[in-house]
Image (cartoon, rainbow, N blue to C red):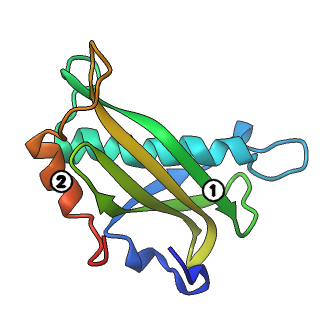
Amino acid sequence: MNGSAELTPEVFPHLLEIQTRWNDNDVYGHVNNVVYYAYFDTVINRFLIEQGGLDIERSPVIAVCVDSQCSYKHSIAFPDLLHAGLRVEKLGNSSVRYAIGIFHGQVLCALGSFVHVFVERTTRKPTPIPPPIRDALARLATIAG
């Protein structure tokens, strides 16, 4: 995703409100970098559960992260109220690449990418994305994706 300066929450088809927590701050007084990855996991997996019907305890197909990246744009701290924007950049047969924007108001604080590969729970071998999840992900797909 290039041109991050013009990114606003409105360019993400799915938004999740995230309240920072006291323990998100580090000794420097801002949200620690590793916490952003927890925000990524939260917005993605809540979407898969709530919109795609993923049963994280019993589904025969699960999604595992194979690649992730984050560019930090603006500092955030407790007690900031954030929004995590989610969109699908590329939807493959057994994988999906997401873009995630972490916003404080209209300010882009972090821009991330995250790749899931869907695998059989028991064998961990790649498998096609189940139709209900694929349908949900397709609703988040960008035109270029």
Q: Amino acid at mark 1?
A: Cys
Q: Residue at x 26, y 38 (%)?
A: 49
User: Can you see residue 21?
Assistant: no
Of the image marks 2 and 1, the number of the one nearer the N terminus? 1
Q: Residue at x 73, y 69 (%)?
A: 74
Task: State left or right for residue 93 relative to residue 109.
Answer: left
Tell me where residue 12 appears, x and y as whole percent. 38, 71
Q: Which mark is residue 70?
A: 1
How far separated are the C-alphas under marks 2 and 1? 24 Å
Q: Residues within 10 Å of mark 2 (few under 14, many from 20)?
A: some
Say which quadrant the C terminus sits in: bottom left
Name the residue tied to disc 2.
136
Check disc 2 and report its element: helix, strand or loop: helix
Which residue reaches farthest top?
122
Which residue reaches farthest right?
28
Task: State left or right for residue 61 relative to residue 28.
Answer: left
Front one among 87 and 76: 87
Task: State left or right for residue 141 relative to residue 23.
Answer: left
User: Can you see residue 57?
Assistant: yes
Q: Amino acid at mark 2?
A: Ala
Tell me where residue 7 appears, x and y as whole percent. 52, 80
Front one among 128 and 103: 128
Q: Residue at x 28, y 15 (%)?
A: 123
